[in-house]
Image (spheres, rainbow, N blue to C red):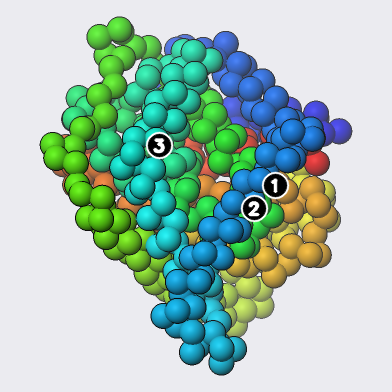
Amino acid sequence: MNVVFLFTGFLFVAGLGYAFSHNRKAIRLRPIIAMMIAQLVLAFLLLNTSVGIELILFISKVFDTLMKLGISGVDFVFGGLENAGMSTFFLDVLLPIIFISVLIGILNHFKILPLLIRFTGFVLSKLNGMGRLENYIAVSSAFLGQSEVFLTTKKQLGLVSSKRLYTLCTSAMSAVSIAIVGAYMTMLEPKYVVVAIVVNILSALIVANIINPYTLTKEEDLIEPVEEAEKPAFFQMISESIVDGLKIAVIVGAMLVGFIALMNLVNELFLLIFRISFQEVLGYIFAPVAFLMGVPQAEIVSAGSIMATKIVTNEFVAMLNFKEIASSLSPKTVGIVSVFLVSFANFGSIGIITGSVRALNEKQGDLVAKFGLKLLLGSTLASVLSATIIGVFL
């Protein structure tokens, strides 16, 4: 039965992607099949083998320890609130992002993270035959996030075609930032967060191959990450990373305040006028997609509501809502929905990516704005594919 849902889920992704493809004759099946096989192998190894399970446990413990260390700094500054029993999501989940941001800054400073990204991207390019820049962005997005990733290749941003730009942006929106992975793990089972990060890289490239197929010449297949003119001093880098982490925490917190309040307002209006909440309406709209992904029929409305909430608002809002109902759902539904939620695919991200690209190259930013909705479609289909892949092993 799981294989059937894998087929229906992929058929939905491929069919919708094919419908919006700009050049259907250029679609290459070989790299798509190769990447899907790689996804299935990786998901199986991570979820169903002792080595994979131990690896996920290790990664989970690492992030759990990092979050606790981050909270130790929060306790020192806000200890009075903690001791008074006033611990909040902002203090315990968002502020520790500052500490993880510092660690990422250190890994970047000593060229450890760039080396890892380059190696993984090179291996991936041998699997799918796509450009080195495409694979570099796909991998680095998983570490750096959808905004920061373009800073590392701003030399080439103005040189890539609109087709390549779409693929780069789809990868960015389908990823997450490692700086907030620890926060995700406080709301979702850590194993699904880890698996989603890995599988999403390939899902974005698969969808891009369907919606946005193209070929590259050797001259076009170049990658030149930006080198800093002058490497900042170590403690200057630490200070900048702290400020960056604080910005992320405050922005996420502000978005939660706004989106949750807005969602509650819309729900109240729908209940008053239609006697049904807006989130329930979203659940019914998205229920068929949840069914095709392998969610048990009795839970497709609940699952669909959470998945649609993520697209309309953001993943944090959806995760908080999901955390409240996860105990009443089957393990399979929990796994599928959890993986779907781990990405930046939502309406707000269209503006974030457009602004990030426009800040580096105004002309390319205007192009991103033009295919913004198609970008959301591609990244959402990537999330659907990732969740469907995971459902096979649950």
Task: From this view, report whether residue 105 is shown above or below residue 86.
Answer: above
Q: Amino acid at mark 2?
A: Lys
Contact (Cβ within 8 Å) of mark 3 with mark 2: no
* In the displayed structure image, the side of residue 35 where residue 389 appears, left or right: right
Give the secondary structure at mark 2.
Answer: helix
- How crowded pointer 2 is (Cα within 10 Å; few <14, some 14-19, many 20+) is rated as few
Asked if residue 64 can be seen in this view, the reply is: yes
Residue 61: mark: 2
Contact (Cβ within 8 Å) of mark 1 with mark 2: yes
- How crowded pointer 1 is (Cα within 10 Å; few <14, some 14-19, many 20+) is rated as some
The quadrant in which residue 276 appears is bottom right
Q: Label 3: which residue?
A: 113
Give the x, y percent position of residue 390.
71, 38
Quarter that holds the C terminus: top right
Residue drawn 60% across the image and 67% down it: 320
Residue drawn 31% across the image and 42% down it: 109
What is the residue that sits farthest to the left in this orientation? 229
Give the secondary structure at mark 1.
Answer: helix
Residue drawn 45% across the image and 48% down it: 177
Q: Label 1: which residue?
A: 57
Give the x, y percent position of residue 81.
50, 88
Quarter that holds the N terminus: top right
Residue drawn 25% across the image and 24% down it: 224
CA separation, marks 1 and 2?
6 Å
What is the residue that sits farthest to the bottom in this orientation? 84
Task: From this view, report whether residue 102 is shown above or below residue 74.
Answer: above
Please tell me which residue lies in front, 391 or 24: 391
CA separation, marks 1 and 3?
22 Å
What is the residue that sits farthest to the front in this orientation? 234
